[in-house]
Amino acid sequence: MNQSFYLDRASGWHALHPLTKIAVAFALSVTAFCVRWDFISVALFVFVVIPFAVWGNIWRPVLRATFTVILPLAVSLALIQGFFFPGAQDVLFQIGPFALKREGLEFAFVTGTRLMLIAGAGLLVVYATHPADLALALVQAGAPYPLAYIIVTAIQLLPEMQARADGILKAQQARGLETTGSLRVRVSALLPLLAPLVYGALENVQERALALDARAFRAPRAKTSWRVLRDTLAQRALRWLLVMFSILLIVASVFVPLFIR
Amino acid sequence: MTFMERMQKDFTTITLALIPVAIVINIVVGQVVALLKIPVYMDSVGTMLVAILSGPLAGAITGVLSNLIWGWVLPPPIGNPVAAAFWGTALVIGFQTGLFANWGWFKNKLPQSQAIAYVLGAGMLLTLLQLFLASPTFGSADFTPLALTGVVMGIVLTVITTFLTWRGTFPPLIVIGGVLLGIVSAIISAPVAAQVFGGATGAGTDLLVALFRYSGLDPLTSNLAQGLISDPFDKFVSYVAVWFIVRGLSKRLINQFPRGENVTDR
Amino acid sequence: MSSLAVEQLGFQYVQAKSDALRGITFEVPSSSITAIVGANGAGKSTLCYALAGFIPHFFKGNMRGAVRVNGMDSKQTPLAQLVTQVGLAFQNPFNQISGAKLTVSEEIAFGLENLGVPRAEMETRIARALELFGLEQVAHQSPYALSGGQQQRLALASIFVMEPPVMVLDEPTSQLDPQGTREVMAAIQTLAAQGRTIVLVEHKLEWIAELATRVLVLHHGELVAQGAPREILQCADEWGLNETRYARAARMARERGLVAKDVLLPQTLEQATNFFRV
Ligand SMILES: Nc1ncnc2c1ncn2[C@@H]1O[C@H](COP(=O)(O)OP(=O)(O)OP(=O)(O)O)[C@@H](O)[C@H]1O
Ligand SMILES: [Mg+2]
């Protein structure tokens, strides 16, 4: 009943503290944005993201998910920028009134690969981190306590509600409700579909709140945790280094011409 | 009332219990609408609901978390990291809707003539906006088809909403709220789309962006123009949907929310 | 000694036209099972909310009178503190699952986490709760994967583990099949045997006659009768309640002149056996 990226594998990457993994992904993303070399994102993806994904035994899903997300974006980007990049001169070829230009494609390449890197780095974290651990780590790092509740509950509710949406859709279709056809037909199908779904979910909110309060959810005390996150001094040091590195890079990219393409 | 006091008043346990449900409503309603191939996003209905029942801050937080979870916690095909980048827009949708609700815009309160005047005004504003966006004054090329579509949509919407207002079907100010929110969220989304994504998001609306770029507009303005076409319609339709949802909730339930009086008459 | 005292309690939900409770006064003796009965809308749930502090701390409305929990006035005491004194479980087992936890053990731990109980202590308390409510086998399953009866026992275990001296249970079996009902009732009996004070709202009078030490009858928001189960349940139908099958059988027998008129109607199997032996 719980739907998330998380894949339970016994790997060293999985065993790292959630914040360590997030720090790695963050440093990767910052580097991709700050270093002005056209191939930086591709290099980081090939030489960091993929090896880590192999280490975590999650390279297949990471690659698959990265490309499902990036491909439609990349196609759009290449077309929009390739044809309509402002100030581009170097025409590669002409289709009717449209000219495909090199500068535009280059820009699309840099932006597209940067997004690919960010997506890949993020997926590296979420495929190897249990959402409850992620939530706990965030709370232990100082995020408000209800955040953990909101994240985990949303993840658990979603499949249940999707199943219900599916059921209602099928039931309405069986009763002869048109869900294909003209826009008017589809719009008028919307209300009988959504109403039971939304009300079904909202009906329970008050009782859920009662149940939470009955369990001292809002007690103003320091909370403890049944789940245990493993953290080490080395990891703490690594996180600190990664954050420092990222900050330095951001500052450097503003001032040092070295980074300007 | 200080900020902290307001937080405490709005973030009751029932608000906290509503937020994950609202996030899931955002996602599932967005999916159903996409499944039926209805050309709006409708991905903020839950956020709007929280904003109306529990105030602007709760709405804003729901919006942000919704997009972050959508983007980074759920796997594809549902999850999509693109959504995460637009957390700022989601924040504004939640906050702005909460303000509108606090101002009583989700209650039916105006005399009929005034209501119709407001709705006609909003509809005309929308239509003129579409006309302007598609005109040579704004861009440099002239796309009659686009202009025509926008204007026809604007007029049809104006006629329908005016009729429904005349019948007293929904509070007239939500039409204005929807159009205003659409304009604001277009302004906030445009820089993100242009800067982070180079103008493309991989969605159907990219076609519009391409069209504006072809007409010679710069990247930011193209994305802005695309948003100004898509968003007001989307937000208006979402407001009508969320109003119907709220109207169908039992008064007892509404009363237990911190801002229940936004939709009931005390 | 009484752990719960209710004095002239009245409550009107916000924007409601009439009072849900009016002038209610009673005490709950320690280590007992006190049953609350009444027709639909009589105010049973509202009374439970007041006993556990959710009125006035959760529900908006107008409360009069007072509820004292171990001497503390519920109006003056924060809810998070009250729930460590009075635990509340209710009807729908599904809605009582916090949603924030992935296994049965974690779900039981939730209340302890919120109270800041150290992990080592959690471990023993959770183990005890799992055992008492027969949940050891499913400790590592998702709470959503359990049967209704198991979910309701999980709900009780999650409250039990916080060790409130009083547990208020609002129709904990109304959504369960007979098997699930038996499981939950057995758990309640065990709790009472351990010295917990139980307040139980229940429609099935057979169970009340079997378990309760005292019965309170609510009718249109007022407390109309209280006393020992057998006496109180004599006039069940006057308050719109479904009398037990034993009482119905005995009444029919009496109407046909098969038994004497002055004998109390039986409410349990044991009483019925004696009744018909006469
Ligand atoms: N949130 C609320 N707002 C307004 N009125 C309410 C609310 N909840 C309950 N009531 C009303 O208060 C009265 C008592 O309701 P309550 O739920 O306590 O009854 P009950 O005895 O538990 O009934 P049931 O057997 O149906 O559970 C009823 O008239 C009901 O309609
Ligand atoms: Mg009840």
Image (cartoon, helix red, strand yellow):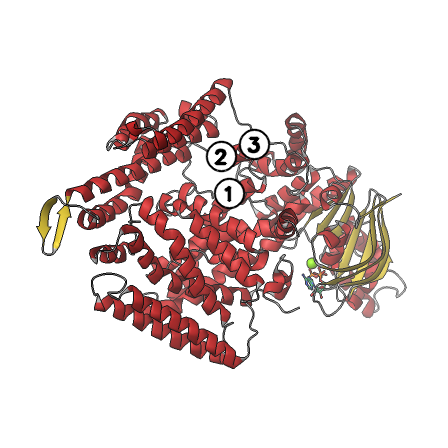
Mark 2 or mark 3: whose residue is earlier in sequence: 2
**Picture coordinates of residue B194 (x, y %)?**
31, 48
Q: Quadrant of ligand 1?
A: bottom right
C66 left or right, relative to B257:
right
Q: On the rendered structure, is C270 left or right of B89?
A: right
Element type at mark 1: helix
Name the image quarter holding residue C47: bottom right
Among the two numbered marks 1 and 3 on one chain, the one whose residue lies closer to the N terminus: 3
Q: Position of residue B36 (x, y in %)?
A: 34, 61
Tell me whether the residue at label 2 lies in contact with that at label 1, contact meaning CB atoms closer than 8 angstroms: yes
Asked whether residue C69 appears in the rendered view, the answer is: yes
Task: Name the residue: 50% across, 55% down.
Answer: B94
| Rendering coords of residue A123 (x, y %) | 37, 36
Regarding mark 2 in the picture, which secondary structure is present there? Answer: helix
Residue type pointed to by label 1: Ile
Q: Amino acid at mark 3?
A: Gln
Which residue reaches farthest top?
A234
Instruction: Measure how far apart labels 2 and 1 are at the Cα level.
Output: 9 Å
To the question of a shared chain for discs 1 and 3, the answer is yes
How many neighbours does mark 1 have within 10 angstroms: few (below 14), some (14-19), or many (20 or more)?
Answer: many
| Residue carrying label 3 | A140
Q: Which mark is residue A151?
A: 1
Give how far apart the Cα atoms at labels 1 and 3 are: 15 Å
Same subunit, tags 2 and 1:
yes
Cβ–Cβ under 8 Å for marks 1 and 3: no
Q: Chain of mark 3?
A: A
